[in-house]
Amino acid sequence: MSSPVRIGLIGTGRIGRVHAGNIAADPSVELSWIADPFVEGARSVSARFGGKVTESPEELTHSGEVDAIVIASPTPTHVDLISSAVDAGVPAFCEKPIDLDIARVDALREKVASSGVPVALGFNRRFDPDFAAVRARVEAGEIGRLEQLCFTSRDPAPPPADYVRVSGGIFRDMTIHDFDMARFFLPDLVEVSAVGTQMFDDGARRHGDFDMAVTTIRSASGALVTIVNSRHSAFGHDQRIEAFGEHGMIQVANAPTSLVSASTAASVEARPPYQEFFLERYAKAYAAELAEFVKLVRGEPSSSPTFDDGRAALLLADAAQRSAEEGTVVPVQLDAG
Amino acid sequence: MSSPVRIGLIGTGRIGRVHAGNIAADPSVELSWIADPFVEGARSVSARFGGKVTESPEELTHSGEVDAIVIASPTPTHVDLISSAVDAGVPAFCEKPIDLDIARVDALREKVASSGVPVALGFNRRFDPDFAAVRARVEAGEIGRLEQLCFTSRDPAPPPADYVRVSGGIFRDMTIHDFDMARFFLPDLVEVSAVGTQMFDDGARRHGDFDMAVTTIRSASGALVTIVNSRHSAFGHDQRIEAFGEHGMIQVANAPTSLVSASTAASVEARPPYQEFFLERYAKAYAAELAEFVKLVRGEPSSSPTFDDGRAALLLADAAQRSAEEGTVVPVQLDAG
Amino acid sequence: MSSPVRIGLIGTGRIGRVHAGNIAADPSVELSWIADPFVEGARSVSARFGGKVTESPEELTHSGEVDAIVIASPTPTHVDLISSAVDAGVPAFCEKPIDLDIARVDALREKVASSGVPVALGFNRRFDPDFAAVRARVEAGEIGRLEQLCFTSRDPAPPPADYVRVSGGIFRDMTIHDFDMARFFLPDLVEVSAVGTQMFDDGARRHGDFDMAVTTIRSASGALVTIVNSRHSAFGHDQRIEAFGEHGMIQVANAPTSLVSASTAASVEARPPYQEFFLERYAKAYAAELAEFVKLVRGEPSSSPTFDDGRAALLLADAAQRSAEEGTVVPVQLDAG
Amino acid sequence: MSSPVRIGLIGTGRIGRVHAGNIAADPSVELSWIADPFVEGARSVSARFGGKVTESPEELTHSGEVDAIVIASPTPTHVDLISSAVDAGVPAFCEKPIDLDIARVDALREKVASSGVPVALGFNRRFDPDFAAVRARVEAGEIGRLEQLCFTSRDPAPPPADYVRVSGGIFRDMTIHDFDMARFFLPDLVEVSAVGTQMFDDGARRHGDFDMAVTTIRSASGALVTIVNSRHSAFGHDQRIEAFGEHGMIQVANAPTSLVSASTAASVEARPPYQEFFLERYAKAYAAELAEFVKLVRGEPSSSPTFDDGRAALLLADAAQRSAEEGTVVPVQLDAG
């Protein structure tokens, strides 16, 4: 067995800690460095899972002691950290989105492509076992040609208003996962049409964001993607997929928290609410995306989402934002520069 | 098209009215006579659906104007009415049970058999489209050899205490449907084991009956039947079947009253309670059993339950009653006299 | 009890026969006249259900022997037949759509409004017991403010190409039901955005129609309606509604054809396909809409969809068609002339 | 925080390894010694999770370096190992059953009781989160008085014939879990009635065992327990509970392996088969029962099943075996010696 891949973790917030836990649990990798300008965060992760601590991501990346980095710091830092990893020749896994500004993404794109340094994007939903199973079954032809793809993505509760302010808006922050999933099933998306409104979240109202949205995307083949989003859901995480084709439909239901149901004079077959928290809903997906990134680092065949996947999702988000603002269908060109 | 089969209906209580409605709705039959000693009942059925009225079942059977009779009068009248129909050479459809006393049934048996006059029993559940579909799929070999058969039969509410008193007990009154269904799937039943208790129904308590029971029946092949009964069910009619075999399981779920479900912070996918009323739950079955009886009358191939089916169900009920009272397994011999 | 309402039926095609059957089954109405230029159709309906026969709708409407008419003839005849009914002072029930041309509808509108003659539209889905139950529960506040409304409407198979040619296109022919349902829940719709494509139906391809479409409608309150349509569905009629609000979600599932499910080594809980045929799926709705129309004719409080409901649905369909063709969001004004 | 509880593991077969993994994963305990006469097994567990190795359980128990032991060795060793733990004053967790011979269990009973040394039994199903939730909701009165309790327990495939030979038979080996669960809900069980047959498993046939069984148990209150067992199930582990009472029913469904369902022209809503393997099905339960035992060791309030729970389950199994062999109802007295 080869020696463990030494991983440097940048950022020790909520998602950084998920990655730390998954790194610790995987014997093929090792958490060797942890960087966070808020050095207390790094220290507390180190106390639990081991690893050297620094407040400087640069020091970590250029330490010569990491075989790969995981970037889980705030979005505005992503472009510089990827760029630095490419300079150091260190493979990087970066949380979505690359950046909220497509110009900054495009400026980095050529450098990444020509460097040959692997850069993977954190589109964890591709690695959810059920979503992945649906896609595999669609690819295997079980329902014939794919004609319609419907995503329902409703979060349990809106993020804090301060987060909404810097989030880039619902399309770049939340729908971006659905955009990536849409491309995962249908790479040839050509036209985006989106409607957003604001009904319940004060943070969205104050910062000019939508708190719900419906997006329709047309693929070159004629297949249609529908994405229904809401920033709240009284009954827990609402995360469903419906792939409809020539010969039938494959669906992913919501994740139950229990196998228990109750039947009384009031109602029958009532079950407890769904999972509240995305880290719990997608726990397996986070572990699986890390394992896939490790394959990429080792030079093995890997299906990690790429820098260009990250860019394409952002282009779709930008198009949706413009469509919702201007009331027009917005064409997208996802392949060329 | 042949002329309609003229049917004489004896008994105009709840179940008699169901048969009247089905006869009226079926263009291949005609409600020609209606008999009820409580002649007002017969008159009100006639006012709605037509037919001559009499208070004398004998007059009806021997009128020469009926091609067949439907016996929906109280259980103690069944044996004499069947006997009379046989004398008149008129095919008879009789509600279950034939009688509560196996000796009286046996006394009639030879007469029916040697007469050649068709006698059908009202085991309507065989004609429920879903139950029938399960049996057909089992017969077709979909789950291989049948190994276990589980019935859950819970009525919404106990019958009136006065009815309980003359009902013959839960096994002869209620489980008898499940006994017939058990034989419908597995004809070679050889041994009955039953436990009954009384927990909630005052009528059962007063008249020494059980208000719930569990019956296990062994077939010669080794297949096992389980019947779970209760005289009440807070959430509506609970009528389920589970056929389990070598290659899998086929189940019949409860009949929903609606396609609607609700998901809130309290519970998800909650649906309205099931149907309350057996006449509604088995409406299609009542119509189908009548149509099958008409085939029998016309001399066409018919799967109407026979007199011997009625006798076999009673033998099983008697065995269950004895098993529950004595705490022993009771062998049954369903084929011979 | 008042004397039966005498109904004249115009048109004896598939849907006309459904109405004939429902009229015959309802003791409060009577099928008194039947008109069809293809007089054989009228004769065959009369043979089964009674009623005078004519090939002239005009003769029927002005016979003085009908208290109301049901218009089930081809769409191009609707405007003239309604107009004629108004002239005769005879209440009319007309199948949707009023016409494919909003100008003709508008031209008739004032006449209908000023006449005081009741005109009802055949939006049967409002009368589906499950759809009606969801709306009643939403109105009762069970899920708080309604925020999102999602319709999935997929027909089992495309109509014949000849029908597609004269249908007015998928939005005016098929989605029109969903448009009416959207307004049934959310009357204040203000903006339509639609995307249509053609992937599988040759008839749609030849006649420049779409065979699938996704429509998003914004209400003044910010609530969002999503309608997903397809002209085919391998597993039977796919007709679902999801009402999502502040406090939860109420859904209508597809109508099962059976309560049976099977579990084997291949899959578990598999059920037979859904109903294939809309007349079967909506049988109760057709009967209920007729009963509601009879109330209207009798001058009783009635919730029959009105002429203006028919016009509003057509305005939405027109807007969707334009949106899909031009790639822009199309505002609608449903209240004013 | 207190220092970790040092645990000695005896037996390193399949279930021993599950406990080893759970001990290793729980920071409040530590795997300090591992004993197995097949010392290679102990060494391989130690290599993975740490701990001293011995081939002598005695050495482990009396090492003075264990605060508690987990007995996961073959059933015939259980009584001596518990006895030795009691001698050493070391709390013991023992896999079910205590022994196949009630006389040996009774002989040990007084010693355990008077010693005050905690002895816990491995009835893991009590700790399954869904089963535990049902019981908690029943205890909380959600369905009123409990009237009927139905267990369906079907294993994916029969054990090897060699195992069947020494297993003590289906009731003592397999149903024993259901017996314990029955008492978990209804402590006052008084009478057992069981039927067993042999239809498919050659091992059962050769060694005179049943491969399926139905058991009915009556409680003093009149509540009825039904247990349906089979040694095979084509669609995976079939493990369901239904608690039925005055005000309704609470059910535990089978554990899905996926949230995916498929709808085609062949069937709708078909899902992948259930879990095959009991260690996977009950993974959470194994971890939770260990945590509960640790509380017991620490002297904290604990709901670990006791030695007497183990004895009561064996008494029920003995009664079921006798009932199935003799065809009589068998009374049980679970409280006294």
Image (cartoon, coloured by chain):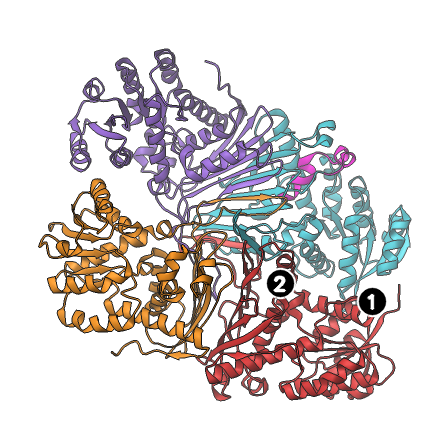
Chain colours: A cyan, B orange, C purple, D red
Q: Quadrant of residue D160?
A: bottom right
Asked if badge 2 and badge 1 are on a common chain, one would say: yes
Residue C3 at x, y = what percent?
25, 26
Which label sits in the foreground, 2 or 1? 2
Looking at the image, residue A230 sits to the left or right of residue C71; the answer is: right
Q: Secondary structure at mark 2?
A: helix
Front in this rendered view, residue B27 or D35: B27
Q: Residue C237, relative to residue D77: is it above or below?
A: above
Q: Residue at x 36, y 29 (%)?
A: C292
- In what quadrant of the picture does the N terminus of chain D appear? bottom right
Q: Which mark is residue B286?
A: none
Q: Residue A244, relative to residue C2: is it above or below?
A: below
Q: Quadrant of residue C304?
A: top left
Chain under label 1? D
- In what quadrant of the picture does the C terminus of chain D appear? bottom right
Looking at the image, residue B324 sits to the left or right of residue D277; the answer is: left
What's the amino acid at mark 2?
Phe
Magenta residues span A159-178
Residue C316 at x, y = what percent?
46, 25
Q: Which residue is mark 2?
A: D131
Residue D274 at x, y = what percent?
54, 64
Chain under label 2? D
Front in this rendered view, residue A226 or D333: D333
Q: Which residue is mark 1?
A: D28
What's the amino acid at mark 1?
Ser
